Image (tube, rainbow, N blue to C red):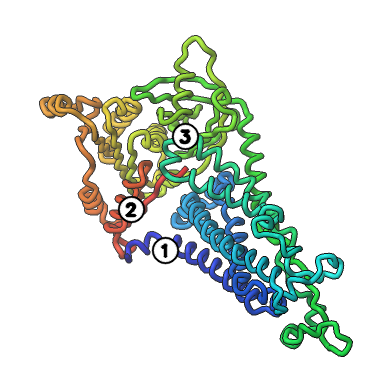
Amino acid sequence: MANWLVNHWLSVLVLVTWLGLNVFLFVHAFLSYEKGDKYYYTREILGSALAWARASARCLNFNSMLILFPMCRNLLSFLRGTCTFCRRTLRKQLDHNLTFHKLVAYMICLHTAIHIIAHLFNFERYSRSRQATDGSLASVLSSLSHQEKEGDSWLNPMQSPNMTVIYMTFTSIPGFTGVIITIVLVLMVTSSMEFIRRSYFEVFWYTHHIFIIYFIGLGIHGISGIVRGQTEESIKESHPHRCAEFFEKWDDHDSHCKSPQFEGNSAESWKWILAPGVLYIFERILRFYRSQQRVMITKVVMHPSKVLELQMIKRGFSMEVGQYIFVNCPSISYLEWHPFTLTSAPEEDFFSIHIRAAGDWTENLIKAFEQQHSPIPRIEVDGPFGTASEDVFQYEVAMLIGAGIGVTPFASILKSIWYKFRHADHNLKTQTIYFYWICRETGAFAWFNDLLASLEQEMEELGKVGFLNFRLFLTGWDSNIAGHAALNFDKATDILTGLKHKTFFGRPMWDKEFSTIATIHPKSVVGVFLCGPQALAKSLSKYCHQYSSLDPRKVQFYFNKENF
């Protein structure tokens, strides 16, 4: 637990602050509506359900304001670029943008449920008190005339005893927009499930973009002022604590109490979402502008295991190691944009990506480039955007861990290392790199085999053999491959990759790997970078905590994961 706090204290602080603000806003709004004199008569009809509805609405507005900020990728990249002097702990928070986005979404769902349930009670009590003929205070308040709107006399939005809850729900602005918002939210949340995103990315992409309807509905949800409270002038003239018990004598000539006057609450939601909405619009405008800039494809390479490599150039394009771009192919879909990590180095005069067939869009893209007698499809590019891998050269020791096509950000890093050694870059802080590549099939190693061979040779010529350590693991093999490897184990080079570093069969024993590195580098700061599945991320994060020393002068493991 102590090691976990050492690595995540700032994340905990941010989370606690966010939760604290939610609690504060909820409690403050709840007490205002539950205890405030302004809503004394409203509570006579609705009871505590009024406070529950309004408190949850306040938190809904707050979290709806926050949910767009983590999606402003240009803003995050700008902050990361301008915060190079910040401590790595502070910069790491920017890499948790998707996690925070999901947490805020869960909070919105929670308060939406509370808000809906509370208003179901409210509508039912509005209906019941409107139909009541018992002469109670609630029935008197509900029967205040709607015809005298200029005098703000009405309190119950149900205009007649015959109006039903269902009719009120679908004909009033709050009711109808509430139904639309709820449907949109359900669609976005269900389509965001891991299974849907992995298997049917297009469904996730399209349904997630109906968030526009959500924000429009939220902005106009409260404009009719259906929740009403007593006006300040009316409270001064006829305070509810003094006049409520004499409601039968309101407006009598000899009574000091007059019928209360009410006013609707002004719409609040638009005030919360205006600033992030404008910021996000500028974000999208910038993305659109950049995406319209011409991209020239200079080279197309088909690798084994259905992996397509595209090398491109674009005017004004500038990148850092480990960054990613969004790619669109209008001939396949005008609207779909997919993220891909850059596999080129900043030192190169082009930028490249590797695309593996993993869905309808990527399969169609690969087929389009495989057609030899057809013109090359037009590609649009937006980015680049920053990731955790940008910080790799800030660590003395780095563990780069790629699973399958997850090797792509580290290809960029390894290429950059090759250039740095070629140009004798003395500013390189990193002293040792451990590169782990876990593949299911042998053909995958061919994607970057030439790069690994060049690096291996370069390190040997410069006498830096210990600087770059390859750990290649093959998890899918048959007896023929294993037998062939065993017979040729004594050869200088590996039979699968041609490298001097041998390929391991099976999965890494991470406990042993971390223990070895902690022993070799007892006083170093080790950056652990992963591009791979969530299950592996949990395992690596656990070992980072386990092998990090509480003494800041000794070995520290910092876990970083690619998030798109």
* Label 1 crowd bin: few (<14), some (14–19), many (20+), radius 10 Å: some
Q: Name the residue under label 2.
A: 541
Give coordinates of residue 563: x percent, y percent: 45, 45
Amino acid at circle 3: Phe
Amino acid at circle 1: Trp
Asked whether the residues under the numbered discs 1 and 3 touch, taking CB atoms below 8 Å apart as contact, a structural biologist would say no
* Label 2 crowd bin: few (<14), some (14–19), many (20+), radius 10 Å: some
Of the residues under marks 2 and 3, which one precedes in the sequence? 3
In which quadrant is the N terminus drawn? bottom left
**Residue shown at the point (51%, 60%) measured from the top left:** 110
Asked whether the residues under the numbered discs 2 and 1 touch, taking CB atoms below 8 Å apart as contact, a structural biologist would say no
Amino acid at circle 2: Ser
Give coordinates of residue 468: x percent, y percent: 29, 39
Q: Name the residue under label 1.
A: 9
**Residue shown at the point (36%, 53%) measured from the top left:** 558
Q: Is residue 533 left or right of residue 152?
A: left
Q: Which of 180 and 325 is in front in this view?
A: 180
**Residue shown at the point (46%, 28%) measured from the top left:** 360
**Disc 3, SS:** strand
242 up-or-down from 511: above or below? below
Residue furthest out toward the top: 373
CA–CA distance in space, label 2 to label 3? 24 Å
CA–CA distance in space, label 1 to label 3? 31 Å
Q: In this view, does 358 lie to the left or right of 515?
A: right
Q: Name the residue under label 3.
A: 340
**Disc 2, SS:** helix
**Disc 1, SS:** helix
Q: Nearer the viewer, residue 556 or 158?
A: 158
